[in-house]
């Protein structure tokens, strides 16, 4: 298999708070270039956008999903538009161990419809489709469970980062609501607070005090859903999305943002569930090296918490404390376990 061995993202540390991202930010083209590739399966040439320089993350979610200025995951892998084969740009043209028929059996047909030629079904593939294909190829090649899990969580994270891609039809809807709500100055001394989550908390407090009257109840709930969804906090995001629909029954039909949030949350949940399956397989099969046990347990805690299984999350945070060899911030583990404990009754 000619994909670059994946770098495991299971060593988790805390990250300092940074300034918030503009929800309508468009990626700077200085980071991206069009490059010509030749498919190792069909021999046909095509152009694909790839990163031409390193992009630093401005912040990280509690599960270590990076937040760069734009969705870099869209340009991390190259996908063959005819067969769906994926690899890192520098390895894409290497010999492929599968033919077109084998790839069709492994990958199936694209799940997301696009107006593309029938012979090139993977043209303009979404970032998560690329990582899902990478995961399925890793499974076919019988890679270790942790490496397979890593591809699945990258698929989940690429869905999460699509919220701030700058190319969505709902961006204007987000901007229209956010310009009528106050912004909060970030506190760079607090290492365990993420800007969007602190902003959501502040807005809730102000709303409870009878302030923020420039937006109606449905718009307010939709804005809160966006904030929580942007950081992968799927449970409160779904809660606020439900409240928005209660305040305005027409939202599911009329709001692009509502429909997008609903579908993207569902898709990330599916990818996180699959990630959890492979992490558990690796853990139960004694495949996790001692140096990675703390990070793996912590990630299982985070995934379970984001899926709403707080009992399992608390268990895995405790395991993370037990197996932590210094790569994890003890304060971070305690912070996240306390969060799961506070929501265990819900």
Image (cartoon, rainbow, N blue to C red):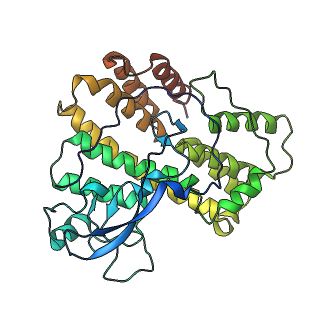
State the residue in front, 239 or 330.
330
Q: Is residue 141 left or right of residue 20?
A: left
Q: How many marks?
A: 0
Q: Is residue 80 left or right of residue 23?
A: left
Identified at 74% across, 35% down, the residue is: 184
Residue 95 sits above or below residue 44 on the image: above
Location of the C terminus by quadrant is: top right
Identified at 25% across, 60% down, the residue is: 92
State the residue in front, 44 or 175.
44
State the residue in front, 6 or 277.
6
**Where residue 29 appears, x then y in whole percent?**
53, 58
Location of residue 125 (image quadrant):
bottom left
Identified at 56% across, 56% down, the residue is: 27
**Where residue 129 appears, x then y in whole percent?**
37, 61
Residue 49 sits above or below residue 284 on the image: below
Residue 60 sits above or below residue 330 on the image: below
Identified at 54% across, 27% down, the residue is: 339
Location of residue 120 (image quadrant):
bottom left
**Where residue 248 appears, x then y in whole percent?**
73, 60
State the residue in front, 258 or 13.
13
**Where residue 342 appears, x then y in whole percent?**
56, 26
Location of the N terminus by quadrant is: bottom left
């Amino acid at each position: 298999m000619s994909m670059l061995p994946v770098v495991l993202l299971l060593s988790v540390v805390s990250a300092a708070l940074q300034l918030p991202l503009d929800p309508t930010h468009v990626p700077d083209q200085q980071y991206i270039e069009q490059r010509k590739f030749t498919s190792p399966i069909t021999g046909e040439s095509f152009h694909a956008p790839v990163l031409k320089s390193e992009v630093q993350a401005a912040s990280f979610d509690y599960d270590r999903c990076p937040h760069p200025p734009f969705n870099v995951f869209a340009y991390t892998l190259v996908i063959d538009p005819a067969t769906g084969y994926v690899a890192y740009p520098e390895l894409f043209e290497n010999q492929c161990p599968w033919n077109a028929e084998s790839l069709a059996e492994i990958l199936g047909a694209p799940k997301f419809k696009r107006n593309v030629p029938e012979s090139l079904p993977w043209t303009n593939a979404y970032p998560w489709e690329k990582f899902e294909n990478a995961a399925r190829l890793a499974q076919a090649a019988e890679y270790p469970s942790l490496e397979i899990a890593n591809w699945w969580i990258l698929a989940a994270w690429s869905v999460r980062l699509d919220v701030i891609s700058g190319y969505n039809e709902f961006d204007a809807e987000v901007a229209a609501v956010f310009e009528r709500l106050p912004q909060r100055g970030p506190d760079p001394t607090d290492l365990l607070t993420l800007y969007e989550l602190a902003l959501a908390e502040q807005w809730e407090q102000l709303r409870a005090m009878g302030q923020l009257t420039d937006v109606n109840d449905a718009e307010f709930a939709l804005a809160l859903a966006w904030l929580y969804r942007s950081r992968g906090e799927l449970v409160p995001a779904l809660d606020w999305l439900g409240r928005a629909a209660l305040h305005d029954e027409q939202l599911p039909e009329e709001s692009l943002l509502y429909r997008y949030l609903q579908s993207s949350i569902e898709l990330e949940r599916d990818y996180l569930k699959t990630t959890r399956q492979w992490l558990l397989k690796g853990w139960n099969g004694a495949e996790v090296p001692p140096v990675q046990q703390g990070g793996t347990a912590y990630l299982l805690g985070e995934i379970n918490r984001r899926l709403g299984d707080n009992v399992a999350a608390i268990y895995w945070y405790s395991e993370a404390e037990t197996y932590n060899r210094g790569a994890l911030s003890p304060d971070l583990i305690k912070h996240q376990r306390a969060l799961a404990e506070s929501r265990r009754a819900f």
